[in-house]
Amino acid sequence: MFKFLRNRGQKFSEFHLAMCLADGQQSTSLVRKATVPITIGGRTFQIDLIFLPHAKGNRTLLGVDFLRTSGIVMDMRNDFWYFGDKPSFRIPFSKDVPLPVDDSPVEINSSSCPKID
């Protein structure tokens, strides 16, 4: 994702970020940040993406901050999600999400993520 955005002229800022890993280890790393539009369910949100320069081959993760900003509620038990302001419009989790083979973006077809009116 970093190379994809950089190749398209995205601007990044750098700062030191304190992180705590799942095993409890703490470290501080120099990271890069970009604010980019993320569109899901027909809604677009400006989201801060953090890039770890030394990490290789990582997939992009949208975390709790994204869920909070977008208002998405995930029902893991029943395999669907919805926007908090439209709880009756439930969207099933996609089963077959293609993985990139190079630095190209992954397009998910509209049936995997329908537009919400």
Image (cartoon, rainbow, N blue to C red):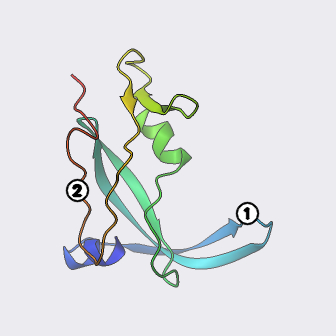
What type is the residue that disc 2 sits on?
Glu
Tell me if label 1 and label 2 are in contact, CB under 8 Å.
Answer: no
Counting from the top left corner in percent of width and height, residue 95 is at 39, 46
- Quarter where residue 112 is shown: top left
Per the rendering, the mark at residue 117 is: none
Counting from the top left corner in percent of width and height, residue 63 is at 52, 50
Counting from the top left corner in percent of width and height, residue 6 is at 27, 77
Mark 2 = which residue?
Answer: 107
What type is the residue that disc 1 sits on?
Ala
Counting from the top left corner in percent of width and height, residue 28 is at 67, 76
Residue 86's place in the image compared with 12, above or below, is above
Mark 1 or 2 closer to N-term?
A: 1
Residue at (19%, 73%) from the top-left corner?
8
Residue at mark 1 to residue at mark 2: CA–CA distance? 30 Å
Residue 36's place in the image compared with 32, above or below, is above
Residue at (41%, 27%) from the top-left corner?
82
Mark 1 Cα shell of 10 Å, populated few (<14), some (14-19), many (≥20): few
Mark 1 = which residue?
Answer: 22
Q: Nearer the viewer, mark 1 or mark 2?
A: 2
Residue 94's place in the image compared with 74, above or below, is below
Identify the image quadrant of the C terminus. Answer: top left
Residue at (38%, 23%) from the top-left corner?
90
